[in-house]
Amino acid sequence: MESGIMAMAVAINYLCARYFTSPLALALTHTARIVLALFDICDHDIPLPKCDIVIAADIMYEPKTGIAMAQRTVEALNAGSRVIIGCSPGRPGRPKFQEALEKLLPGRDTKFIEVAGKTCMGPRNDLICGKGSTSVSSTPKSLSVKLLDLRPI
């Protein structure tokens, strides 16, 4: 699934939240342990559900989602959740995420690490893989992606 997934894991059950639901319907055909929900990471009037692990991927398309994810990261850590974030190269929200997180968690190591990944294939929305994107190709190619894994203190 592409274009912004945030999953909250609770034991063996999962809440998979997106800003729209159509791609999530595919997940329901593969497992009965996924509960569908709309969740706007930028709407701070709605708290994160209680969970053990927050996993966020492909959500840093805009600076505002990067800043919101930094705030949600701190919210999750303060609630005792582990936070894992994956980010493809060149996402405009990642620098703002990094800046905000460093201010919110001073003295804490909040740097992404580089991990090996593969490009995706097939048609993609321009928001996800626009002109000049290095994360899509006609055949899988090696791609460096960034990963951040934070545990509650």
Image (tube, rainbow, N blue to C red):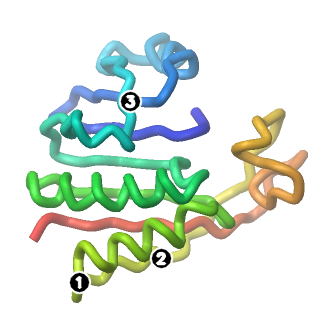
Q: Position of residue 24 (x, y in %)?
A: 49, 20
Q: Mark 1, mark 2: which one is toward the viewer? A: 1
Q: Position of residue 116 (x, y in %)?
A: 61, 67
150 shown above or below 102: above
Mark 2, residue position = 113
Mark 1, residue position = 106
Mark 2, other Cα within 10 Å: few <14 / some 14–19 / many ≥20: few
Determine whether the residue tagged by mark 1 lies in a helix, strand or loop. loop
Q: Mark 2, mark 3: which one is toward the viewer? A: 3
Whether residues under marks 1 and 3 lie with C-beta atoms below 8 angstroms apart, the answer is no
Q: CA distance from mark 1 to mark 3?
A: 29 Å
**Residue at image point 16% right, 46% down:** 52
The amino acid at mark 2 is Ile
17 shown above or below 94: above
Q: Position of residue 5 (x, y in %)?
A: 47, 38
Relative placement, left or right, of 103 versus 118 is left
Instruction: Mark 1 or mark 3: name the one nearer the start of the chain.
Output: 3
Q: Which mark is residue 17?
A: 3
Asked which quadrant contains residue 50, the reply is top left
**Residue at image point 54% right, 59% down:** 63
Task: Tell which of 69 and 114 is nearer to you.
Answer: 69
Q: CA distance from mark 1 to mark 2?
A: 18 Å
**Residue at image point 34% right, 13% down:** 32
Say which quadrant the N terminus sits in: top right
The amino acid at mark 3 is Ala
